[in-house]
């Protein structure tokens, strides 16, 4: 039995497939989010953030499960781009927004866990990590090697989600406190951190031939040629990514210019 | 995949999609010719191989496109009628040539070229069947020989590298 979607090289079938690994990950995410969001609600987090988080849980599950999961794994680069946008750019801020208060309150004042979080969520480190993940998971030889295996496809999907959480943590979660990381700096951080995936999308848009063998040599799924599908993938990454990033930057800007940072006060005094 | 010694361009006659006799050796002599045995109901290899060659041929200058022919011989004449063959090939390129003959004739041609025979699977409950066939594109250059075979897995970028070089092969004296 297949536990995770991977490129099989077999012709597409509309017969639904069950992927236990996807359901397990979705269940772990749902349970973890439920606990955090309940605490978040008790700490005053808004209903909008709460439901936004649950929407993110549902989106993560849907993009990983049948039919989008297997389509993205072995048939359509454009479906894979949708996965990237959801897993790395859209779901993480929604999840963190609903859970930011309990995450901040639950962060120990000192110790190894705090040290790791403090290091990884330093904006420079977080931005570099996210972009390294984005680059590595779009290199053709990496994609063509990993996607035909369940473990490899799992690694790429989870790397996007974890990379996204790391990228968005310094923006959304008020701990560790970094006084220098003001709203204008955050907007700049967000803009700079997403330039790399914009560049990857541009490469996909301008290439004359398909970049990824798994999609080029896959049994045809639609009338789209592999190159048209790749251009669509580049467009999805470019456009959907821009809508998410600049949408959030715009909200941050107006809240900041209106005198509200949208932040919650930190729960513990330690600083960088 | 290099062919040593080079494979000479074969002579055979089958029916093209207009219903006319097509003499392969005569009609393609001196031209860059892609020869592929497949079937239009193929779910994976055939559409990918044909689409990849077509995609790269479309990027060539018109003069080079005129020097190339793609010939698709059906390994499933029972289902691949001439109109079905034409309709399927037109998805990729209206200039691609579709040929059909009876099973025995196509088998003989494949054998003469050194290709394994096409094998029909047992029909399923719905009567559908698949045809096992060579996934290789045989490319004859202007010297009327095939020096290279292209197995399934050949990427468009590989074709884009090779086709201009294949077009540079000079014809044999007298052609």
Image (cartoon, rainbow, N blue to C red):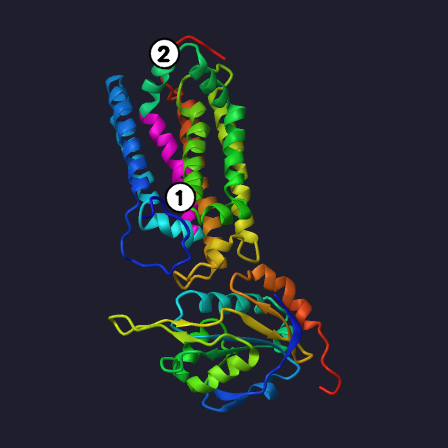
Chain bearing tag 1 is A
| Residue B167: x %, y % from top left | 67, 72
Q: B76 or A62: which is nearer to us?
A: B76
Q: Residue tagged by mark 1?
A: A83
Task: Specify the principal SS of the magenta part.
Answer: helix
Q: Is residue A124 magenta?
A: no
Answer with left or right where residue A263 lies relative to residue B25.
left
Specify start and end residues of the magenta stretch as a single range.
A78-98
Answer with left or right where residue A139 lies relative to residue B167.
left
In the depicted structure, whether residue A104 falls above or below residue B88: above
Mark on residue A267?
2
Answer with left or right where residue A67 lies relative to residue B50.
left
Nearer the N terminus, badge 1 or badge 2? 1
Q: Is residue A247 visible?
A: no
Mark on residue B92?
none
Q: B59 or B75: which is nearer to us?
A: B75
In the depicted structure, whether residue B18 falls above or below residue B161: below
């Amino acid at each position: 039995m297949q536990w995770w979607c991977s490129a099989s090289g077999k012709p597409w079938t509309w017969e639904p497939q069950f992927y236990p690994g996807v359901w397990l990950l979705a269940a772990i995410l749902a349970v973890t989010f439920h606990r955090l969001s309940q605490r978040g609600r008790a700490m005053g987090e808004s209903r909008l953030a709460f439901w936004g988080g649950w929407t993110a849980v549902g989106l993560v599950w849907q993009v990983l499960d049948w039919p989008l999961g297997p389509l993205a794994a072995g048939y359509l680069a454009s479906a894979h781009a949708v996965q990237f946008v959801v897993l790395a750019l859209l779901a993480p801020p929604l999840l963190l927004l609903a859970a930011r208060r309990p995450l901040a309150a639950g962060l120990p004042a000192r110790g190894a866990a705090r040290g790791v979080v403090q290091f990884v969520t330093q904006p420079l480190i977080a931005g570099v990590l996210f972009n390294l993940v984005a680059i590595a998971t779009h290199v053709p030889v990496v994609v063509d090697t990993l996607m035909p295996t369940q473990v490899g496809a799992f690694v790429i999907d989870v790397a996007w989600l974890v990379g996204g959480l790391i990228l968005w943590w310094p923006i959304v979660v008020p701990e560790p406190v970094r006084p220098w990381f003001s709203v204008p700096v955050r907007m700049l951080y967000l803009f700079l951190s997403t330039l790399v995936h914009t560049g990857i999308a541009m490469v996909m848009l301008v290439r004359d031939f398909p970049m990824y063998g798994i999609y080029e040599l896959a049994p045809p799924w639609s009338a789209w040629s592999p190159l048209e599908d790749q251009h669509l993938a580049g467009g999805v990454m470019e456009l959907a990514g821009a809508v998410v990033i600049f949408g959030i930057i715009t909200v941050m800007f107006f809240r900041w210019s209106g005198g509200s940072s949208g932040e919650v006060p930190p729960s513990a005094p330690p600083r960088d | 995949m290099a062919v040593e010694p080079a494979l000479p361009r074969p002579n055979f006659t089958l029916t093209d999609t207009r219903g006319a006799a097509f003499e392969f050796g005569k009609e393609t002599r001196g031209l860059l010719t892609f020869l592929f045995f497949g079937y239009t109901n193929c779910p994976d290899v055939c559409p990918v191989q044909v689409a990849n060659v077509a995609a790269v041929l479309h990027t060539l200058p018109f003069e080079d496109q005129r020097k190339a022919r793609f010939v698709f011989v059906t390994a499933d004449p029972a289902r691949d009628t001439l109109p079905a063959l034409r309709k399927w090939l037109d998805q990729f390129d209206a200039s691609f040539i579709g040929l059909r003959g009876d099973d025995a004739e196509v088998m003989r041609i494949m054998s003469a070229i050194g290709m394994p025979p096409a094998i029909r699977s047992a029909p399923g409950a719905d009567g559908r069947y698949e045809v096992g066939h060579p996934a290789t594109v045989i490319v004859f250059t202007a010297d009327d020989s095939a020096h290279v075979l292209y197995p399934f897995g050949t990427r468009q970028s590989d074709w884009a590298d090779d086709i201009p070089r294949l077009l540079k092969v000079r014809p044999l004296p007298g052609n």
